[in-house]
Amino acid sequence: MEIKFYKYQGTGNDFIILDNRKKEYSFLSTSQIHNLCARRYGIGADGLMLLNERNGFDFEMKYYNADGNESSMCGNGGRCLVKFAYHMGIHRSTYKFIATDGEHEAEIDTDETVSLKMKDVSNVKKFKGDYLIDTGSPHYIKMVNDVMNLDVYNKGHEIRYSKDFEKEGINVNFVEQLSEEDKIIVRTYERGVEDETYSCGTGVTAAALICYHNENGFNEVEVKTLGGSLSVEFDRLEEGKYKNVWLTGPAEMVYEGVIRLDE
């Protein structure tokens, strides 16, 4: 059968998106999704998303990693799906959608960037000198120097498959604090992709929360990734508690097409 697909990217984090409001693509298997995401043999992407209908919401977000397995929240994916919903005729001043980690709000800004409200965070753990934090997906944050010359694949793979995390997996973020206290660089090894991606929205959010510059109150952190720049705004209430967390950055359609899928 033939599948109509759309390709979107947010700071180099790229996704296949299918309009599943008529439930045409709910049958897709793990292996079929994996093959569609394969960069040499399929369309190629970090993940695949379904735009579903859901009562009480503008839409439902269903996200699958490149390995074909359904996954936890994807921040850049959520921002891209909002832009896709707009292109599909769902026009709102503020979007309200449901994902695996609960309800989200989003807005398309006047400069065409997309701002996505992330979940509140209240549990940050210190682990062997580093940090563990869940921003809709689980993240390991390691502060480093000279992150652009770091072997992210091997070091990230080592942590992700260590005894502490090999069962459930974890995303590993290497973060460099720049001389300006409100600017950081983040590189991420993503579980489910099992490689470094150009950007990771929930990882960028997690890193920004750790790298706050205002101990109590409003913070805005600018984040550079391999694929571009994002910003994270949030209120830090006290140690390990964050509310009103917004992730902002570009989300763009790359192309649309039709691919034949073996049944």
Image: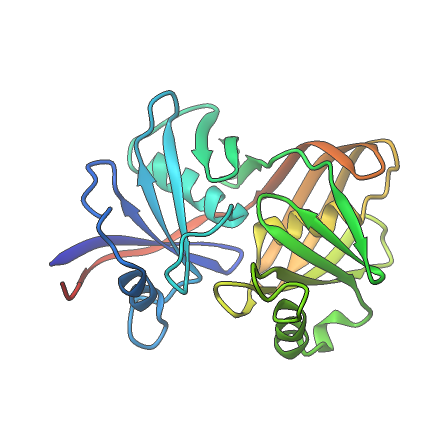
In the rendered view, tell whether residue 101 sits above or below residue 244: below
Horizontal relation, residue 16 to residue 174: left or right: left
Residue 254 image position (x, y, % from top left): 37, 56
Dividing the picture into quadrants, the one containing residue 160 is bottom right
Q: Which residue is drawn at 64% across and 79% down?
A: 154
Dividing the picture into quadrants, the one containing residue 21 is top left
Residue 67 image position (x, y, % from top left): 40, 65
Q: Residue at x 33, y 45 (%)?
A: 50
Q: Which of 200 and 148 is in front in this view?
A: 200
Residue 171 image position (x, y, % from top left): 61, 60
Which of the image's four quarters has the N terminus? bottom left
Horizontal relation, residue 71 to residue 237: left or right: left
Q: Which residue is drawn at 35% across and 36% down?
A: 85
In the rendered view, tell whether residue 74 sits above or below residue 177: above
Q: Can residue 212 be seen in this view?
A: yes
Horizontal relation, residue 226 to residue 17: left or right: right
Q: Can residue 108 be seen in this view?
A: no
Q: Which of 44 and 110 is in front in this view?
A: 44
Which of the image's four quarters has the C terminus? bottom left
In the rendered view, tell whether residue 109 sits above or below residue 1: above
